[in-house]
Image (cartoon, rainbow, N blue to C red):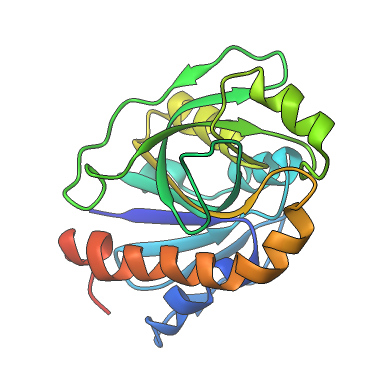
Amino acid sequence: MKILLTHALRSEAGLIKQHYPLSKRDKPTMGIDLTHLNGQLDILRLGMGPEKTMTSLVNLPEAQSYDLIIHFGVSGSLSETFGVQTIVRGQRFLYKNKPSINLPRVNLLATESLPEATFLTVLSPITDEGSRLKALTTGAHAVDMESYPMVTFCMKKDIPLLSIRCISDRAGDSTAKDFKKHYKAAAHKLQSFLLNHYLTEIKIST
């Protein structure tokens, strides 16, 4: 099974890359920052935002060679249920006036017990209560800047997708403060989850 991990920020994947000391990074070209962790597992840094995400994906060489894509990163919460450092799995995805997308379920032992969430993709972080209230009207539980184009790409290419995020902040007027305080711990927790549970279960070796 060949798997692609995708993320936005370089620091969201540092722990995972350390786990694969023999990894080889391709020379960056056409917006692609791709590292081969081993023969079964690659990792792609998308950059922040829908536009950079789609640029990376459309220029990804041999995308059809992947049996599964795992998109991971941190998110701001719109739900009182999902507090900081809660790991959630995206099941429904929203973006602007685009139609909502329900992601076909990928059933895996490590993720079956994760709470499901609706992700709203935004162009910039939500940093005030007015924007939070507007986002809440969509029915979303969390916000991010990459999920919707990720989902549309995978569905177009017929590649199964698992979208997992860890809450780093309460989206609203405390976003900056929360992010500064909790980002490192949230990113570390999510990477540890992937390494200790999911990547182990599908027998991805170092």
- Name above or below for residue 16 compared with residue 108: below
- Name above or below for residue 147 compared with residue 194: above
- Name above or below for residue 56 compared with residue 99: below
Residue at horizontal 34 percent and vertical 63 percent from the top: 194
Q: Quadrant of residue 137?
A: top right
Across and down, in percent, residue 26 comes to 57, 71
Across and down, in percent, residue 158 comes to 38, 28
- Name above or below for residue 146 compared with residue 121: below
Residue at horizontal 34 percent and vertical 36 percent from the top: 160
Apparent side of residue 6 relative to residue 193 in the rendered image (left or right): right
Apparent side of residue 170 relative to residue 51 in the rendered image (left or right): left
> In the displayed image of the protein, which residue is found farthest to the bottom?
21
Observer-nearest of 121 and 155? 121
Residue at horizontal 75 percent and vertical 23 percent from the top: 134
Across and down, in percent, residue 42 comes to 42, 63
Observer-nearest of 128 and 122? 128
Across and down, in percent, residue 28 comes to 68, 67
> In the displayed image of the protein, which residue is found farthest to the front?
80
